[in-house]
Amino acid sequence: GGFNALLVVQFFGYYLGGFLITKIKPSKFMLYISLTGAFLVPLASSYLYINLPDPIRAYVLSYASPMTVFTTFLIFIFINQLINLNEFKFSLKIKSFIHLLGATAFGIYLTHELISKFYMYVLGEFYLFVITINPILATTITISTVFIASLIFTLLLKKNSLIRFLVP
């Protein structure tokens, strides 16, 4: 259980990509393209997921899959464009929500895998049944549920003084 350098190496592309994304000049075109792509790529991949052979299906939803990497970068681009375009005046509620996401993003990242596994364990065969009937709806509900549950779990963990001390 010591330090695993492979964990750092496999996410290096995300770090480098995040840096390069900050260099993209803000434009409404990039804002709309990234938002549209961030929704269409996972939906199309989920739809195609049903027709893939079993060994490949697990890869489609893994962290290293092209769909996951591409969607992640599109979301990063969208958020970067949204923040850097001076045309948008955010209400106090939206600013508070963006701040909340920024303050909890690392916790959401750390807990979402646990929440996701629990979600799949609870639903089991029912999830497999639903995803074969309507993969787009099943994927959308799963992503939303896991995200919201991870956010709530992270907020609850932040109330613990020991955890707040270890992870400020």
Image: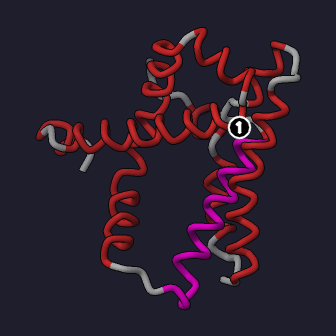
Q: Quadrant of residue 76?
A: bottom right
Q: Position of residue 14 (x, y in %)?
A: 64, 51
Q: Is residue 22 above or below residue 56?
A: below
Residue bounds of the magenta highlight: 67-88
Q: Position of residue 23 (x, y in %)?
A: 67, 76
Amino acid identity at mark 1: Ile
Q: Is residue 129 left or right of residue 65?
A: left
Residue found 47% across the figure and 22% down from its top:
119
* Quarter containing the N terminus: top left
Residue found 47% across the figure and 36% down from its top:
145
Q: Secondary structure at mark 1?
A: helix
Q: Quadrant of residue 134?
A: top right
Residue found 69% across the figure and 82% down from its top:
28
Q: Is residue 168 left or right of residue 101?
A: left
Give the dominant element type of the magenta stretch: helix, strand or loop: helix
Q: Position of residue 144 (x, y in %)?
A: 51, 41
Residue to which mark 1 is pinned: 136
Pick the residue in front: 125 or 3: 125
Q: Is residue 39 left or right of residue 114?
A: right
Q: Is residue 162 above or below residue 29?
A: above
Q: Residue furthest top?
A: 125
Q: Quadrant of residue 50?
A: top right
Q: Is residue 67 left or right of residue 119?
A: right
